[in-house]
Amino acid sequence: GHQASECKFSNCKICNKKHNTKLHYNQSTQSEKGDDSDVEAAVSPKVLHVRTNKEKVLDNSYHHAMLATAIININDASGQPRQCRAILDSGSQISFITRACARKLQLRNSNASTSIAGIGSTSLKVIRLTPAIVSSCTSEYTTALTFHCINVITSDLPSCKVKIKELDIPNSIKLQLADPQFHKPSSIDCLLGADIFYEIFHGERITISSNLIAHSTTFGWIITGQIYDETQGGTCTSLVTHDAVCQSAVALHVTKNNSRAIEECYAENHFVSTLTRDDSGRFVVRLPFSQDPTVLGDSRYMAVKRFINLERRLQKEPLLANEYKAFMREYLDLGHMEKAEECNDKPAYYLPHHAVLKADSITTKVRVVFDGSACARSGLSLNDILHRGPKIQHDIISIILRFRTHAIALTADVAKMYRQVLIHPDDRNVQRIVYRELPDEPLQEFKLCTVTYGTKPASFLATRCLLQLAQETNDLSVKRTIAEDFYVDDL
C-alpha cells in the first residue's frame, strides 16, 4: 500500500476525492416531508426491513400481509427438542437460523461457508452449521436440516397485533395451528427455505375469507393472506439491501456449495430414519445411496485383476503375506465378513483391497484397506453413488485446547471402531471382495458385514453412531465427553 500523497493515479471521477473511482461509495440520502405522510426508512446491516408509519392509501385503510409462521422443535447439542419460531419462505433456496438461536441450541459450525446473493445481487458469505434435527410439535414428522447462521432474519412478525376474534377461524383449525400465537408480534428464530418448504405442505387448504387462507402442513395449520385495519398504521416488512454487509435472508442464488449441504442433509436424514440395532445391541446402518447400484455395471474383472497384482507382491514379501493372511482370518473369525453366495440378479460391487503398513499402531500393524473409488466398467465407482455425510465431531484444535486445560488427562482408542457398526444385510452385496490365501486355491467371494474403511460415508456412519450413544445416555458427563472429546476413534 501507499499514502494518498504518493498515489500516481488520478482522483475519483465522481467526487474528485483522493480515492479510486471503483472505491467510491454513494452516501446520498433522500427525504420527503409532507402534511399527509411521514416516511421513515430504518435500514441497518442487521435488520433487513423497512418501517413505514402513517402510510397514505386511497381507502384510508391499512393492510397487513400475514406471513406463514410455525412453532417447531429443533434438537439442541444434547439431543433435547427446543421450541423455536420459524417463518416459512419458498423464496429462499436455503434455510437460516439467527445467531442467538444457534448459540442457545449450541449448534456446531461445519467449518464451511456458503456464498449467497440477495435482492440487488448483493453477495455475502454465511456460516453453514452441521445438520440439526427438526420435528413437528403436532405430528411425528422429523427431518434433518442444514441451517446457515445469520444475525437477524427479520423484525417481529406480524408487524402489529391482529384482532384474531374478527378472523372467524374454524375451531378445528384453531386447535391445530402451527403457531397458536401467530396474531401476536414476536421474534423469528429461523427461516425454513425451499429445501424443506414443499415437503411440509399436505396440499389441503381452507378459505377463511376472501383475503385469508389456511394451509395444512406437517407443523399444523398456517394462516396466510391480507388483513385490513382501518384504525392503525404499522410496519411493513420487506427485504431490502443497502450495501455489501447487509445480510439478506432471501437467498436467490447459492453456489455449488449448496449441493454439498443438501447431500449432507440427506445423509443425516437417511441415517436417522434407517438406524436400527440387532439383538446384541449393535448398531445396524444403511448405506446412503445417491443412485441405484445397478448403474455401476461389472466390477469383478477389475477386482480380480487388482488381487492378482496383490498376490505377486505378497509372494515377494513373506512377512507381509503372513500379516495379511492373519488380518483376513481375523476379519472372518470375528464375523466382519462372510462367504458370499452367487449374485443372481442383484446388483453387486467388488472392492479391491491392499495392505497399509502402520508401524506405530498399538492395535494393528498391518491394515487391509478397501478401495471404494475403483471404477467399474461403467466408469463409476461405489463412492460415486454414495453420499459422504456431514462432519460430526469437533475440530481437532478445539479438542486439543480443551485437553490442555486439565491437570491430568487420560487417552484411549476404540479398537476396530468402524467394524463395530454393522451394515444392513440388504446393502452388503455392494461390499464384495475376492480373496484366497494361496495362489493355487480357487478365488472365493466374501461380503463385508461392517462399515468399511475406504467407502465414502464410512467416517460419517461410525462417528454418527458414536454421537447417537451420546444422545441416548442420561449421564451428562459421559454425554459431553463422547460428543466433544472424541476425534474419530481417539479419546
Image: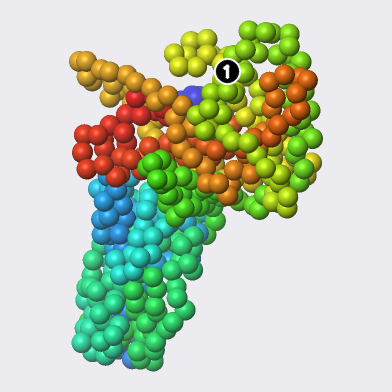
Q: Position of residue 324 (x, y in %)?
A: 61, 17
Q: Quadrant of residue 402?
A: top left
The residue sitting at 59% across, 23% down in the picture is 328
Q: Which residue is mark 1?
A: 326
Q: Is residue 350 left or right of residue 182?
A: right
489 and 111: which is toward the camera: 489
Residue 177 visible somewhere in the drawing: yes
Q: Amino acid at mark 1?
A: Ala
Mark 1 neighbour class, 10 Å CA radius: few under 14, some 14 to 19, many 20 or more: some
**Residue shown at the point (45%, 34%) measured from the top left:** 420
Q: Is residue 28 visible?
A: no
Please say if 236 is above or below 151: below
Is 56 positioned to the left or the right of 434 in the image? left
Vertical placement of residue 66 versus 436, above or below: below
Identified at 69% across, 27% down, the residue is 435
The percent coordinates of residue 134 (x first, y second) are: 36, 57
Q: Nearer the viewer, residue 274 or 200?
A: 274
The residue at 32%/55% (across/down) is 74
**Badge 1 element:** helix
Residue 351: percent from left, percent from top: 67, 34
The quarter of the picture where residue 384 lies is top right
